[in-house]
Image (spheres, rainbow, N blue to C red):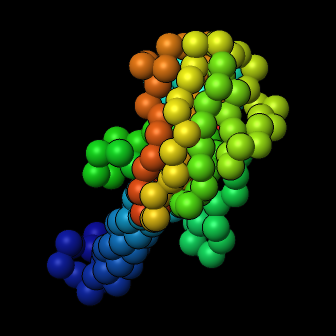
């Protein structure tokens, strides 16, 4: 006689399968939660739109914003960094050029800090039309600018931004 669904012999097997399925579902929920946490709070994927950082970062390139980069260290001049400009949804990738209290100026596409020309090996394209009158970077702010200086200055999102908007460093994928 075959075991019926309610027979004692099939009950442990059924319970074991049920326990295994519960563990699988819990494991899947844990992995999904860990992935969400990692990709939203530690290493957020971003697609670049715009040419302001060319040729260092390609238009429509994929980067990961590595948030922990500045958790225990300060940004350095010349580093590319991700800044939030519209809540935590809109971000820009720019180069950090100056810090609070420094006087910045741009003459014919060349950037000056406190009157000294900044060495910028990452800038490949310049326009002699880029001119910014000298001014002092405000307290709690940094000065950011893209690498592609052949575009009109009006098309760039450049200038002072609050240091608190600094999100992290880009990790280039392609």
> Observer-nearest residue: 41 or 96?
96
Residue 154: which quarter of the image? top left
Where does residue 41 sit, x and y in percent of width and height?
44, 62
Quarter of the figure that contains the N terminus: bottom left
Quarter of the figure that contains the C terminus: top right
Residue 63: which quarter of the image? top right
Residue 64: which quarter of the image? top right
Residue farthest to the left? 6
> Observer-nearest residue: 22 or 150?
150
**Visible residue check, residue 105:** yes
> Observer-nearest residue: 3 or 144?
144
**Visible residue check, residue 79:** no
Where does residue 79 sit, x and y in percent of width and height?
68, 48
Q: Is residue 85 left or right of residue 58?
A: left
Where does residue 163 sit, x and y in percent of width and height?
47, 60
Q: Going 22% across and 81% down the picture, which residue do you hit?
A: 7
Q: Is residue 72 left or right of residue 78?
A: left
Number of callouts: 0
Where does residue 162 sit, x and y in percent of width and height?
42, 56
Q: Going 43% across and 50% down the picture, which residue do you hit?
A: 161
**Up-down: is 152 above or below 62?**
above
> Observer-nearest residue: 78 or 103?
103
Q: Going 66% across and 71% down the picture, which residue do you hit?
A: 73
Q: Going 33% across and 52% down the picture, which residue do you hit?
A: 88
């Amino acid at each position: 006689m075959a075991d019926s669904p309610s027979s004692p012999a099939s009950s442990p097997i059924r319970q074991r399968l049920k326990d295994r399925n519960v563990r699988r579902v819990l494991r899947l929920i844990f992995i999904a939660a860990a992935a969400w946490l990692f990709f939203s709070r530690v290493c957020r994927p971003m697609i670049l739109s715009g040419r302001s950082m060319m040729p260092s970062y390609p238009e429509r390139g994929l980067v990961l914003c590595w948030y922990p980069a500045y958790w225990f260290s300060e940004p350095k001049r010349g580093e590319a960094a991700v800044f939030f400009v519209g809540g935590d949804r809109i971000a820009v990738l720019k180069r950090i050029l100056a810090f609070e209290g420094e006087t910045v100026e741009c003459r014919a596409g060349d950037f000056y800090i406190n009157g000294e020309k900044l060495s910028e090996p990452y800038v490949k394209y310049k326009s002699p039309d880029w001119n910014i009158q000298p001014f002092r970077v405000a307290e709690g702010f940094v000065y950011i600018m893209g690498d592609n200086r052949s575009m009109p200055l009006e098309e760039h999102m450049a200038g002072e931004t609050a240091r608190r908007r600094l999100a992290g460093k880009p990790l280039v994928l392609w």
